Every structure is written in C-alpha cells, then in structure tokens.
Image: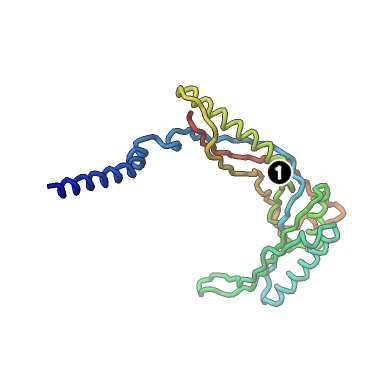
Amino acid sequence: MCRFKFLFLSFGSLLAIILTGCEQQIVNPLLPSPASRSIHVTGSGSVTGEPDIATIYLGVSVEKESVEAAREEAASAMTAVIESLKTNDIAENDIQTENFSIYPQYDYTDEGRVLRGYRVNNTVNATVRELESLSDIIDDAIGAGGDIVVVNSIQFMIDDPTPLQAQARTLAVENAKAKAQTLAEASGVRLGKPITITETTRTVGPPIAYAESAEFAADDGARSSTPIQAGELTVTINITIVYEIE
C-alpha cells in the first residue's frame, strides 16, 4: 500500500513539473501577440527635380546582299558615330556597345521563302553629362553615320538622386504616420512605436522615343538643331510602417 502511495505521489509530482513547464506555452497562444495588436499603413512622398544627365541609345542598321557587305558598311558608319561622340567630349567609358546582330532577311513569295540579304545592327548607349550640348551631339552623330543611323530613345536621369530621395523619404514617413494616427484615433486606441519599416523607391521619367533615321540631315546648310526638352523627373518613396497599438 505504501509503495502504491509512493508511486502515486511520484507520478503526481512529475505531472506537476510537466504542467509547470508547459504552462507558459499553453497560456501564451491565448494572449494576443504584438503583431496582432498593430496598425499597418503605407505612406508616399514625391519630390521633383531637373535631370542633369541623359543616356542616348543610337546605332546603325544596314541591309545588303551579303553579310560582308552589310558588316563593312555598318562598321564604317558606327566608327564614324563613335568618333563623333568622342569629339563632343563623351568619355570613352561612357560609351558602351549595347547590341550587335546579323540576321538573314527573306521575301515570301508563292514559290516559298527567298533570301533577300542580311541585316547588321550595331547599337551603343552614350551618357551625356552636359545636357546643353545634347542636341548637337545627336545631330553630329547622325551626320557622321549617314542615312543608316538609328536613334532609338533618350533617357533622362538625375546623377545623384540622394538629396531628393531624402526629402521624399521624410514626406513618406510623415504621410504614413498621419494615416496611422487617424486610424488610431478613429478606433479609440493609442498609437505606439513603429515595429517595422519597409521602403521602395521609384523615379518617374520614361525614355523619349526618337526618329528612326537621319534623312533630315542631308542638307547641312538648311539643317535646324534638333529640339530636346529635358523636363522634370519625379522621385517617389513609398514607406510601409507597422505601428504597435499601446
């Protein structure tokens, strides 16, 4: 009988220890976690600025009956284009080959596919750091390469967007905090400290499409300078903040 009591007491003690150890784990899930007592908001801040650099995407495109003839003409014209860019103070490391391709060209007739020739495309992108000279740089490159020059687009950018991003970031945080405060007051709770902050950055300024060929450059005496407008760019910061509810 005594032995049975001892075993019963030992089992009871062991059970108490197990329950004591698990008590925290059993109770905690019943209490709301900090993440469930929170307000999630998104704030946005935008600042505009004038671009100070531009990237132009240009090259040559030529079709000939043979690969060698097409490659030779494209190489000669592209060499002239690159030399023109360098003459206009574009640094060599600001000029980068973007694409080089050779494709067969076909005509489709009732008898089937007939090889017409070969097209060679060679394009570069060049960073212009003096926007005042952008029009002359484009016109000179077109004049140097001749009628097979292709200008695809122009992309305006801000070389160092950090100051604008800092301003936009402050506006975004203020916007998010104002939203969270409004939600807290409307819900009858007190807004606490931020738990997490996530940021995304966006600069609005799509590439400007440009004319495909240089036909207008044939008469240098009557040629007008190509009008280019840099406009403005908008730097936008989006902030997602999770605030604790006190």
Q: Regarding mark 1 in the picture, which secondary structure is present there?
A: helix
Q: Is residue 41 above or below residue 85?
A: above
Q: Nearer the viewer, residue 225 or 137?
A: 137
Residue 143 vs 116, above or below: the answer is above
Is residue 37 toward the left or the right of residue 154 in the image? left
Question: In the image, what residue type sits under mark 1?
Answer: Thr
Q: Most extreme residue toward the right, as rendered? A: 221
Q: Residue furthest left?
A: 1
The one nearer the camera, 128 or 7, is 7
Residue 104 at x, y percent in the picture:
61, 72
Q: Quadrant of residue 213?
A: bottom right
What x and y, as percent, mark residue 174? 61, 31
Q: How is the image coloured?
A: rainbow
Q: Residues within 10 Å of mark 1 (few under 14, many from 20)?
A: few
Residue at (58% x, 71% y) in the render: 106
Quarter of the view holding residue 116: bottom right
Q: Nearer the viewer, residue 61 or 20?
A: 20
In the displayed structure image, the side of residue 114 where residue 212 appears, left or right: right
Q: Is residue 177 left or right of residue 134?
A: left
Q: Position of residue 205 (x, y in %)?
A: 66, 45
Tally the numbered discs.
1
Query: Which residue is located at x 70 percent, y 37 percent?
Result: 48
Asked whether residue 221 is in view, the answer is yes
Q: Residue tagged by mark 1? A: 162
Question: Which residue is located at x 64 percent, y 73 percent?
Answer: 117
The image quarter containing residue 165 is top right
Is residue 218 at least partly visible in the picture?
Answer: no
Outermost residue, front side: 2
Residue 71 percent coordinates (x, y)? 71, 73
